Amino acid sequence: MPIDFIDRDNELKRFNELSSLKRPPFIVVVGRRRVGKTRLIQEFIKGVEAPIYLFVEEKRSEILLRDWSKHAGGGVLFASWEPLLRHFLSKYSVVVIDEFQNFARVDPSFFTTLQKIIDEEKHEAMLILVGSYLGMMKKIFEDRSSPLFGRATEIWNLPPLPTKDILLNIKGNFSDRISTFSMFGGYPKYYTILDQYEIHGIEDIWTRLIIPKYSPLNMEPYNILLQEFGGEHRAYFSILEAIAKGKRTYTEISDYTGLSTTTLGRYVNDLINFEIVNKKYPITETSRSKKSRYQIKDEFIRFWFRYIFPNMDLREAERYDELLEMIKIDFPSFASFKFEEVVREIISKEHTRTGSWWNRQGEEIDIVSIDKKRGSILFGEVKWRSRPVGWNVVDELKRKAKLVQWRCNNRKERYLIVSKSGFTKKCLEIMEKEDIMHWNIKDIEKFIQPKLL
C-alpha cells in the first residue's frame, strides 16, 4: 500500500478555519522537499470553490509572466505582474503559489508588487505561498529589510509525518519497515516512489534508487542543499559528511573538515537555523553545557552523506558492488540510530523528560528517561543486531547508570533492554528474576499498532 494522504487533519482544520475569516488570510507554508506540502494544499483546495494553483519555475520573468497569463483566460497577455496578480486575487477564492522562493531568482521585484497589493487589503482571496528552501523563505518573510516582512497572517513549518503513521502505512515485516524508516523518515514522497517502482526490500532500494549514477534519488540531497547554500556548499557538505560519519562534537568536526573553530561556527549555525542539523545535550545538562553534540535531522541526508558523498569515486567508476557491500556491512549501525529514536518516542509518553546521556570520557546510554514527580529514572540500552543480547549488556548498563548525576542518593532506578533479535536464555532468566524490562522487535511493533477499542 503506498503512502496516501494521512495525518494532516490539524493542518486541514486550520486551513478551513482561516478560510472563514472576515479578512482573507495570507498563509506561508514552508517545508523540505518530499514532506508533502503540495499534497496538503491539493487536499485542501479539493473542497474549495474556484481555487487556482500556480508554480514558480525558474524561467525568465517575461516567460513565466506569459505562462501565467494563460491561466487568466480570455487570451490576454499581461504586461506586468501587478495587473495579473490583481486579476487572480479578484477572480479566485484561493490563490496558491508553489515554490515561491524561486521569485528571488526569477524577479525579486515581485515581492514589492505583492506587498503593495496585500497592504491595500482590497482583495477577497485567500493567498497561500509555499516554499521548499527554509533559508530563502526566512529571508523573504523574516528579514526586516524584506518587503514581505510581517505581512503573513501565519507562517507554518510543515513537519515530517509522525513515526506511527509511517510505520503503519509501508510494506514489509516490522524489521524491514524500521530499516526503511531509518533511511527516509517521515517524508511521504519517498514511500510513494518505492511503490511506483514496486520496491519492497532495503537492498532493492539501494541498488535501484540510490547507488547507480542515473537512479532516481542518486543526487537528491545534493540538489536540495545546493539550492540552500549555492557557491559555499562545499564547506557545508564537508560538515555534514563529518557528522554523518560520527564526528559529532565541535572539535571532531573541525579536525575532520580542516575548518578552524572560528570559521566553523558560522556554517554550523546556518545548518541549525535551516533545520538541517540539531544540537543535542545529555538529558541531565542544560543548553549551556559544553557537552553538546550535533546530528543531522533528515534521515536521507544523513544516509547520503554517510555512504554516497564520501564514495563518489566508486559510483563514478560504476563500482556499485563495492559500494553496496560497504553499505550492507555498516547499515545495522546506521539503522540503530533511528531504532533508538523510535524506542525513546514510546518511552517519552509516560515520562517527564526522555533523551540520551553521555560524558566526556566516551560513556553513553541510549535512553535515559526521568520522571520528576515519582523521583524515578529509567536507563535503557537498544541493540539493532542479528544476535541475541547477553547479560553482559545489562551488566554494562547498570555500571554506566551509576555515572549519571541525578538524585544519586534519592532515586528509584529501572532498566530497559531492547533487542531486535531477542535475548539469550540466561539473560532472560536473570532479567525476569531482577524485574528488568526487556522488549524485542515484536514488542515494539505492538506499541506502534493502534489500540483496539
Image (cartoon, helix red, strand yellow):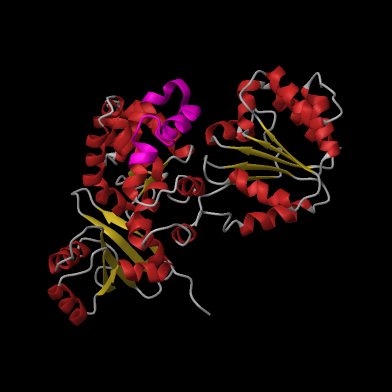
Residue 218 lies in the magenta-colored region: yes
Quadrant position of residue 59: top right
Quadrant position of residue 374: bottom left
Residue 295 left/right relative to 92: left
Q: Is residue 373 visible?
A: yes
Magenta residues (range): 207-234
Q: Is 306 in front, or is 108?
A: 306
Q: Is 22 in front, or is 334?
A: 334
Residue 115 left/right relative to 9: right
Does the magenta stretch mainly form a helix, a strand or a loop?
helix
Count of numbered circles on the image: 0
Residue 67 left/right relative to 172: right
x 21%, y 80%: residue: 432
Q: Is residue 121 visible?
A: no
> Of all residues shown, which one is farthest toward the bottom?
433
What is the x, y in percent for residue 414?
Answer: 27, 73
What is the x, y in percent for residue 240?
Answer: 35, 35
> Of all residues shown, which one is farthest toward the front?
198
Residue 247 left/right relative to 277: left
